[in-house]
């Protein structure tokens, strides 16, 4: 396994694991590597310092401080929330809200009984499972409730 630090064309940095460098090259060529913050598929490897092992015990952290794990986790959580917010905004602006009729409307669209379009709404776990068993493509996404404050 190899860990790459990547950068999208919008300037976001992120890390991703790959089986080997050939796997990264293939996935990047196919457009399968996307920025988790903005979904940009124009990504490249960011410059990385190689991890070199020496016989001397030298603390390289003095040259480049590593943030505490809690800080990194909080940063990643914030990036995930920002990406989820962008995804939610896109769905709200480009898809029709069908509320609790989501399963029925998804089924009608799939079988050609309703206009094909993007929809979003609510479905129970059983309804979602049934849709997937019928090979009706759906996705669950994190949804943040809006507040007036």
Image (spheres, helix red, strand yellow):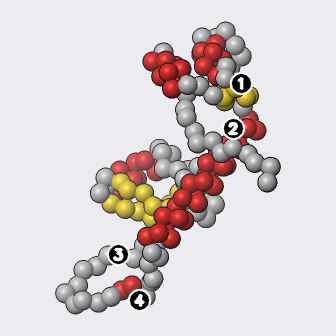
Judged from this view, the residue extending furthest toward the front is 149
Please give the residue where the numbered disc 4 appears in the rendered image: 62
Please give the residue where the numbered disc 3 appears in the rendered image: 50
Residue at screen point 47% across, 69% down: 70
Judged from this view, the residue extending furthest toward the left is 55
Mark number displayed over residue 91: 2
**Who comes first in sequence, dot 3 or dot 1?**
3
The quarter of the image holding the C terminus is: bottom right
**Who comes first in sequence, dot 1 or dot 4?**
4
How far from the left and from the top, in percent, is residue 50? 35, 75
**Who comes first in sequence, dot 4 or dot 3?**
3
For the residues labelled 2 and 4, the Cα–Cα distance comes to: 45 Å
Q: Nearer the viewer, residue 6 or 119?
A: 119
Q: Nearer the viewer, mark 1 or mark 2?
A: 1
Q: Which of marks 3 and 1 is in front?
A: 1
* Label 2–label 3 contact, CB within 8 A: no
Q: In this view, does 144 lie above or below 96?
A: below
Q: Is residue 111 visible from the viewing direction of this image?
A: yes
For the residues labelled 1 and 2, the Cα–Cα distance comes to: 12 Å
Q: In which quarter of the image is residue 110?
A: top right
Q: Is mark 2 on a helix, strand or loop?
A: helix
Please give the residue where the numbered disc 1 appears in the rendered image: 98
Other residues around mark 2 within 10 Å, as few (<14) / some (14–19) / many (≥20): some
Residue at screen point 55% across, 32% down: 139
For the residues labelled 3 and 1, the Cα–Cα distance comes to: 51 Å
For the residues labelled 4 and 3, the Cα–Cα distance comes to: 16 Å
* Label 1–label 4 contact, CB within 8 A: no
* Label 3–label 1 contact, CB within 8 A: no
Q: What element carries label 4?
A: helix
For the residues labelled 1 and 4, the Cα–Cα distance comes to: 55 Å
**Who comes first in sequence, dot 2 or dot 4?**
4
Q: What element carries label 3?
A: loop
């Amino acid at each position: 396994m190899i860990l790459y630090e990547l950068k999208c064309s919008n300037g976001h940095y992120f890390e991703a694991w790959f089986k080997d460098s050939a796997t990264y090259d293939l996935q990047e060529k196919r457009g399968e590597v996307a920025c988790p913050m903005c979904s940009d598929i124009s990504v490249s490897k960011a410059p990385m310092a190689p991890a070199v092992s020496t016989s001397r015990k030298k603390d390289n952290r003095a040259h480049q401080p590593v943030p505490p794990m809690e800080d990194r986790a909080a940063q990643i959580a914030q990036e995930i929330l920002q990406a989820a917010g962008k995804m939610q905004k896109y769905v709200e602006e480009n898809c029709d809200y069908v509320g609790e009729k989501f399963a029925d409307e998804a089924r009608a669209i799939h079988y050609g009984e309703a206009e094909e379009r993007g929809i979003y709404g609510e479905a129970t776990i059983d309804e979602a499972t049934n849709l997937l068993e019928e090979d009706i493509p759906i996705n669950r996404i994190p949804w943040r409730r809006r507040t007036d404050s």
